Image (cartoon, rainbow, N blue to C red):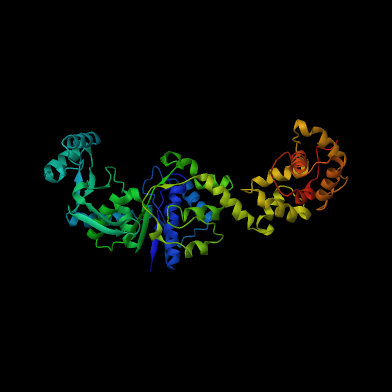
Amino acid sequence: MTTTRFAPSPTGYIHVGNLRTALMNYLIARKAGGTFILRIDDTDPDRSKEEYVDAIKQDLEWLGLHWDRVERQSARLDRYAEAADTLRAKGRFYEAFETPTELDLKRKKQLNMGKPPVYDRAALALSEAERDALRAERGQGVWRFKLDQERIEWKDGILGDISIDAASVSDPVLIRQDGQVLYTIASVVDDTDMCVTDIVRGSDHVTNTATQIQIIEALGGAVPRFAHHSLLTGPQGEALSKRLGTLALRDLREQGVQPMALLSLMARLGSSDPVELRTDMAELIDGFEIGHFGSAPTKFDVADLFPLTGKYLQSLPLSAVQADIAALGVPADLADAFWMVMRDNIETLHDLEGWWVLCRDGADPVIDDEDAAFVSEAMELLPEGAFTAETWGAWTTVVKQATGRKGRGLFMPLRKALTGQAHGPDMASLMPLLQVVKARP
């Protein structure tokens, strides 16, 4: 069975970059009728917060990305300790004691000599007595996985054939000096134990994947299918990493972005398929192909979400937004007409408030100097009482006959006088909703 996972760290709110990974893994699992696991990477007790665990779940539920089960890495520490013992027994795990300053000096020396700045494995030459002395002086060391210095190869679902020389990579630290288990081994043990078959993640993990393949094999596990998606940039190709904090999913939700607009964009962005609004998850699942994505950095512009949101809202019946409209104070007998008129003139549901204020309280008229006399005369001809769908046509006909104006010179000044705007809904449809006209004499 196809099994995928999304493994966020609960150290902050998830953003569009995280969503890209989550969505791809979700769609692969659902298209294959498989299992999608939400795995909370909470092995760092100081930075992991329960409030962020809750927030991650809320954001995924808002998007409709429902998981089949939740796993907590903090509940599996004993299992990681067993895996570490296995690696020690196989001679693939060793303790190292260099300080960060010493490691930095080694890297600089190697670079000056034109060599790759990889760990020199000096710790492997230590005797047991030397290790004991270093522990007494510095405390526990870090634990590194001993790579087989050969080429590591796999066929990536997006990048194609990958080959990395393990000799050009430092033996990865899997357990810190304070005993904290790091992602590299925790993820491998989890993926193996949970029978994960497909892993999609960012292209910044390619080297990490190479080392993890060797760890998987050393632990006797089956290597999953890997795919590494491109990283997001800003609309001009600028690095997006510094802005990701402002692109948290909950911030987009507050701005009025609709889930299907966000999912429709993220399910196609960076692929050879055009971005098209999808109104239900089944369409996204059916049309998703991981092999259609490219390796080039992918431009993301948050502004693209709002036209998609507006288009999605245009497809909704009143029942889908009735609570939102009622919350504005729109009378029940006007709700359907209000929605039918306004849904083609909004990008988010937040825009409805401004339109209802206009209808309820009237707009401050915008009248150009050259139109002042014309508008004053037209307002004298505006019918009294409630407006109907015929009011606009009948009124403008009378005004045309009285003033001789026609076309844009007739209609635009009247629109701006009634709504304070040069653009908006069809006036014949809008006028029955107007409760007040401030431009009346």
Identify which residue is drawn at 26% across, 42% down.
Answer: 177
Q: As drawn, which residue projects farthest toward the front?
A: 404
Q: Is residue 154 above or below residue 348?
A: below
**Corner quadrant of residue 359:** top right
Q: Nearer the viewer, residue 352 or 398?
A: 398
Q: Is residue 298 left or right of residue 377?
A: left
Q: Quadrant of the C terminus?
A: top right
**Corner quadrant of residue 187:** bottom left
Q: Position of residue 409 (x, y in %)?
A: 76, 40
- Residue 218 appears anywhere in the view: yes
Q: Nearer the viewer, residue 325 or 7?
A: 325
Count of numbered marks: 0
Q: Nearer the viewer, residue 91 or 158?
A: 158
Q: Nearer the viewer, residue 265 or 197?
A: 265
**Corner quadrant of residue 260:** bottom right
Q: Is residue 133 left or right of residue 187?
A: left
Identify which residue is drawn at 76% across, 39% down.
Answer: 413
Q: Position of residue 215 (x, y in %)?
A: 25, 56
Q: Is residue 184 above or below residue 3?
A: above
Q: Is residue 381 left or right of residue 9?
A: right
Q: Position of residue 438 (x, y in %)?
A: 80, 37
Q: Is residue 181 left or right of residue 42?
A: left
Q: Quadrant of the N terminus?
A: bottom left
Q: Position of residue 273 (x, y in %)?
A: 45, 58
- Residue 196 appears anywhere in the view: no
Q: Is residue 203 above or below residue 242?
A: below
